């Protein structure tokens, strides 16, 4: 892996996701060996959306991740910077208020949402810390953040096997179902470069979030980070 391969400009990353939009959900199911559905259920439980609440689902893609929130009676806004993803999502779920937005400069007013969440998108944002501050800004005092992201397996032998799978097996597997297999090479590299669980928790705290904690899923392949915006600072 080279640093240059990860230093894509925002428009390059958006274009990459535009290219894989049509088969994105299917590809995720295949390369995660079906675990992506379990992860989505864990996110929905952690967000704990309720009728009348406003939920921001950032990096929502085609809004597969948004549907559980809408089912509770909450008002959910699927937001993404990939126009291709949003168009594909609108075809499938025309009733949802899809919104184009940059995670580092969200198009929402201060203190708008009861809960904000982002799944498998934070590591693709060019300025992670700015995105965490933006999520904080648009969250109501007392509101919550839930971040689901690939992380570091806790058992060392498994971590070694997992990293080998990412770099050697994932691209060939993705090539059987994805329209742009090279996108998954980039995604595999971004996972390897991503901070571990304690490091991401520290960045949440630096952005102002309190009561920060995380839960490992699938042995730490994925981590579910949570935090609360204090009612006063």
Image (cartoon, rainbow, N blue to C red):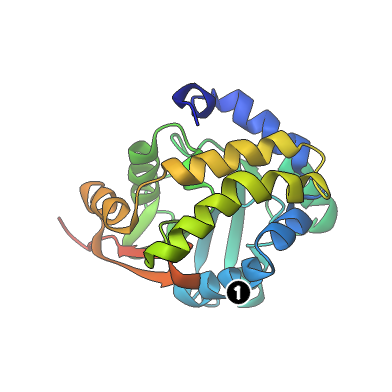
Q: Is residue 34 above or below residue 27?
A: below
Count of all numbered marks drawn on residues in the image: 1
Could you tell me which secondary element the residue under label 1 belongs to? helix
Q: Position of residue 160 (x, y in %)?
A: 46, 56
> Vertically, is 48 above or below 88?
below
Q: Position of 68 compared to 224: left or right?
A: right
Between 33 and 58, the residue placed more toward the observer is 33
Residue at the location (72% across, 62% down)? 29
Q: Is residue 59 visible in the rendered structure shown here?
A: no
Residue 205 appearing in the image? yes
Q: Image point 78% across, 43% down: which residue?
A: 87
Which residue is at a point 67% across and 50% down the rendered structure image? 169
Question: Closest to the observer: 28 or 49?
Answer: 28
Residue 74 x %, y %: 57, 71
Question: In which quadrant of the rendered image does the C terminus lie?
Answer: bottom left
Q: Residue at x 63, y 66 (%)?
A: 36
Identity of the residue furthest to the left in this view: 233
Q: Is residue 189 above or below residue 45?
A: above
* Front position in the image: 57 or 7: 7
Residue 44: image quadrant is bottom right
Where does residue 226 sit, x and y in percent of width and height?
A: 36, 65
Mark 1 packing: few (<14 Cα in 10 Å), some, or many (20+)? few
Figure quadrant of residue 40: bottom right
Q: Which residue is mark 1?
A: 38
């Amino acid at each position: 892996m080279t640093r240059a391969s990860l230093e894509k400009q925002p428009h390059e990353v958006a274009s990459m996701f535009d290219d894989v939009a049509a088969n994105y959900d299917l590809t995720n199911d295949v390369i995660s060996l079906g675990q992506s559905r379990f992860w989505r259920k864990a996110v929905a439980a952690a967000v704990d959306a309720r009728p009348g609440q406003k939920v921001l689902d950032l990096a929502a893609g085609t809004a597969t991740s948004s549907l559980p929130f809408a089912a509770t009676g909450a008002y959910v806004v699927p937001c993404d910077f990939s126009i291709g993803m949003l168009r594909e999502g609108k075809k499938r779920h025309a009733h949802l208020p899809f919104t184009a937005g940059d995670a580092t400069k969200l198009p929402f007013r201060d203190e708008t949402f009861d809960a904000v969440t982002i799944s498998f998108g934070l590591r693709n944002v060019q300025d992670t810390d700015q995105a965490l501050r933006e999520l904080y800004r648009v969250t109501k005092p007392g509101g919550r953040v839930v971040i689901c992201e690939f992380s570091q397996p806790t058992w060392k032998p498994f971590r070694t096997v997992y990293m080998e799978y990412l770099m050697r097996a994932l691209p060939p597997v993705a090539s059987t179902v994805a329209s742009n297999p090279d996108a998954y090479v980039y995604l595999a590299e971004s996972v390897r470069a991503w901070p571990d669980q304690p490091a991401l928790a520290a960045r949440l705290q630096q952005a102002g979030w309190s009561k920060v904690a995380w839960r490992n899923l699938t042995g730490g392949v994925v981590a579910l980070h949570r935090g609360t915006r204090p009612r006063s600072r």
